Amino acid sequence: MNGDEPTMMPEEFAAEMKQLVEDFQPVRFEVSKIQGFAVLAAIQLALRHPDFKGPLSAEVSLVARGLANAFTQLHPGLRSVIEDGFRVPAAPPVIILPT
């Protein structure tokens, strides 16, 4: 894609998404461990976004949990850090600067 292609229309997008939902063939890709950890961290960050809800969010959460399980089996010492990534703070931290 070079940016000159027309944007997909909503009906076309819906049809393509329907095909994705109905096709149960797995997609596989290989990354290094650190790249996989970075993908997990990015997914965890996306899951924290207040507007990211619904069926796609649920699927993304399943992917993240699968990655988390794989990492904690390989590196049990990372379990607490990985689980912290799934926790959403009750309120954003407040930083008080000296006056």
Image (cartoon, rainbow, N blue to C red):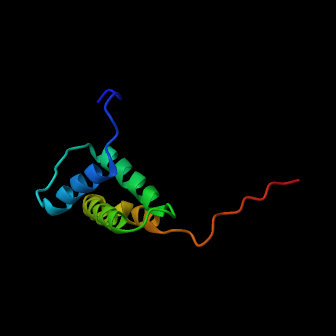
**Which is more toward the observer, 64 or 19?**
19
How many marks overall? Answer: 0
Name the quarter where the N terminus is drawn: top left
Residue 87 position, x and y percent, is: 48, 69
Query: In the displayed structure, does residue 27 sit left or right of residue 75?
Result: left
Residue 48 position, x and y percent, is: 48, 62
Q: Identify the residue shown where x is 33% and y is 68%.
A: 55
> With respect to residue 19, does 61 lie above or below?
below
Residue 14 position, x and y percent, is: 27, 56
Query: In the displayed structure, does residue 27 sit left or right of residue 97?
Result: left
Q: Identify the residue shown where x is 28% and y is 51%.
A: 13
Quadrant housing residue 81? bottom left
Q: Of all residues shown, which one is farthest toward the bottom? A: 90
Q: Identify the residue shown where x is 21% and y is 59%.
A: 18
Residue 11 position, x and y percent, is: 28, 53
Q: Identify the residue shown where x is 19% and y is 56%.
A: 20
Query: In the displayed structure, does residue 41 sit left or right of residue 99?
Result: left
